[in-house]
Image (spheres, grey):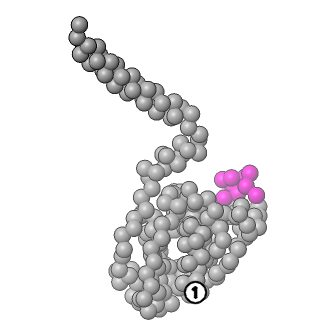
Amino acid sequence: MSTKPFLNLSRRSFLAGSAALIGSAAAAQTENTTEIEREISHTIKRNVSSFRALDWRPYFDNLNGGAVLVDVQSRALHFWSADETIYKLYPTSVPLTEDLTRLGRTEIIRKVVGPDWRPTPSMIERNPEWPSYVPPGPNNPLGTHALYLSWQYYRIHGTHDTRKIGRRSSNGCIGLYNEHIAELFDLTKVGTQVLLI
């Protein structure tokens, strides 16, 4: 009596059973995924931060005081020092929608370590449950450092919620990892030119 058909059948059964087991495990994992995990998994597909180095010349006439370029589409922030010895490229979060996005030229008018935060009137209108004030600390949406721009309510700041970086997730500001905003904070000064494209 040959055992070959039995072995082939067993091998086929094993492979079919393994495929079914893997498929059911994947389905079970999808069904049991938390909302946060589902949101992060969904947004990974939309994380389009571009780490392509750029030259400053198409965007600025000079580098007096240094220059910051924020590319909203690629979700990246570029920095050039005044003497061109330093170039930095950081992933960012950008505004949720087009109507929250402001593009054009501005500059840094104030720098704050440990910023506090107050939602704007339009934020409170959209989210009435939000607190009217958040002091500096781990619950502050501005993270550890903030660069205030000449446009009212607009800032380049850190975030304690690292899931936001690389995504459309802000109410108008540009967000960076806390370690990146700390570095950029030290590189920039009041008067550094900023361009959002």
Across and down, in percent, residue 96 comes to 53, 57
Residue at 45 percent across and 56 percent down: it is 47
Q: Is residue 126 magenta?
A: yes
Would you place residue 135 above or below residue 22 in this image? below
Q: Is residue 33 magenta?
A: no
**Does the image show residue 90?**
yes
Would you say 166 lies left or right of 19 here? right
Residue bearing mark 1: 189
Name the amino acid type tagged 1: Lys
Would you place residue 161 above or below residue 143 in this image? above
The residue sitting at the top extreme is: 1
Residue at 66 percent across and 58 percent down: it is 123
Q: Secondary structure at mark 1?
A: loop
Between 119 and 183, the residue placed more toward the observer is 183
Q: Quadrant of residue 142?
A: bottom right
Magenta-colored span: 122-131
Across and down, in percent, residue 116 comes to 73, 70
Residue at 23 percent across and 7 percent down: it is 1
